[in-house]
Image: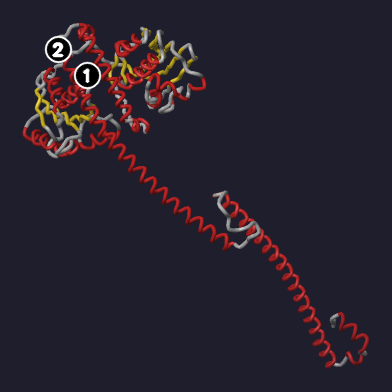
Amino acid sequence: MAHHPILEKHIQKYLSADLLAVDAIQQLLEAIGKSFISFDRDKKITEHAFEVSETEYQKATKDLQAQSEIRNESIKKLKQAIRSLDPSAPQQFSDDDNDLIHIISFLEDQIRKTKALEQELINAKNAAEKAAMAKSEFLSVMSHEIRTPLNAIIGTIMLLQYQDLQPDQKELLNVMEISAENLLSLINDVLDYSKLEEGKIIFADRNINILHFLKNIKMANRVKAEERGNLIKVIYDDDIPEFVVGDDVRLGQILNNLVSNAVKFTKDGTITIRVELKEMYKTDLALGFSIEDTGIGIPKEKQELIFERFTQANNNITREFGGSGLGLTIIRRLLQLQGTDIFIESEPGVGSRFFFTLAFKKSSTEIREEAKHSGDLKFDLSGTRILLVEDVEFNVMVAQRMLRNWHATVDHAENGALAVEKVSANDYDLVLMDIQMPVMDGYTATHEIRKFNNELPIIALTASIITPDIQGKAFEAGMNGCITKPFNPNDLYSIIVEKSLKRN
């Protein structure tokens, strides 16, 4: 029988063969052998346990070191982030301060200060919005108040146009009309500049005879040009169609401003209004406009500056020539809202050239031969019954005379409440509804009328520029269109015919 190696050595050294033959001795040796084997097994287990513990200890130590490095790096980056929030602020911890609780407490304090600052900003924003709303309401009221006497001037001119006048009187009246329209454009710019900055402008689509339009621009500026010894020339491309579709009011603002500037800054020189056909497509076209003068010119370094609001190229210009410094800013914004821009070429002492390209739609209007010769269409609203809702007496007189000259039957209501009563008791073809009135405004009156009559066309009359907000509110109340006061007779007639014909 084999025994443990150590036991086997002792047996060979101390026991004889006779003793090994004794059963008791064999049993004893077998028990001792098992003890040796058990000891070896326990020793191996213990050694293995020590090896495993050492490995785990080393691993745990490395993990702790890695976690400590991560913690220190995180604290370092947290400090850097806190300092970057406000580098000038005094810090409450040093570079070797790794007390995370201390740093977090400092960060919480900074967060509290930030939230307080955010609340201050929110309060300032709310205050600014209230101020903007107050400004908007003020401009709306001022717009109405200023346009009312201007409406009287333009309305009188319109009524005089129906009289039999001498040719020289007609020419003077035409100059008065164009000048009044220029004044209206200026008032529009000043009172509604904030809306222009926000892009809240709607561009109309009307037929424009470009050549006739340019002659009007020339006539409006001729007197001032002659006073300064200037000559205004119009160079017109014959390939341009007789009529195009665009916003004549905005185009007039742009060209009048540029021409009046050219006249203002030119002495004994020439101002050239040049228009040429740039591109022609199936449904639209592009025209190039250029206003050239032989005036004082603008230095290269000042040429971009003049497009900034309330800014002139030279501080002496305002004193010598006048002007608000808004004109070129408004021109650029109006063009940008139409997807284009204005450019300048200028040399001091030689002159300036302002030029831009503007897109128009092709016109499908066929102008009658008598209109070409007379310069005016004969408006006829015979059989059309119109309710005029207006509280300003002179506005009523102008509108009534104009509509009656077109042979319309006109009824009048002084406010929205009376308008509701008249519509419920009478049959009208169309209602011209002022928006701002005492007792009941135009929006409310229209809303009340729509409760019992959804077919009657109602056109809003407003003394403000028609913006998406005004137009949206009018349509929401149930109105069918908008027109501004003072209104252009062509626009008024067109919208009356369009809406009343749709109903009939």
- Amino acid type, callout 1: Asn
Mark whose residue sits in front, 1 or 2: 2
Residue 142 in view in this figure: yes
Residue at image position (33%, 21%) is 253
Q: Position of residue 155 (x, y in %)?
A: 19, 21
- Alpha carbon of mark 1 to alpha carbon of mark 2: how far? 18 Å
- Amino acid type, callout 2: Gln
Q: Is residue 487 left or right of residue 349?
A: left
**Which residue is denoted by mark 2 in the rendering?**
163
Residue 288 in view in this figure: no
Q: Is residue 324 left or right of residue 43?
A: left
User: In which quadrant of the rendered image does the N terminus lie?
Assistant: bottom right
Dividing the picture into quadrants, the one containing residue 141 is top left
Residue at image position (53%, 57%) is 107
Tag of residue 490: 1
Q: Position of residue 195 (x, y in %)?
A: 33, 32
Q: Earlier in the sequence, mark 1 or mark 2?
A: 2
Residue at image position (10%, 29%) is 412
Relative depth, front residue between 402 and 143: 143
Q: Is residue 267 left or right of residue 247?
A: right
Dividing the picture into quadrants, the one containing residue 382 is top left
Q: Is residue 201 left or right of residue 302?
A: left
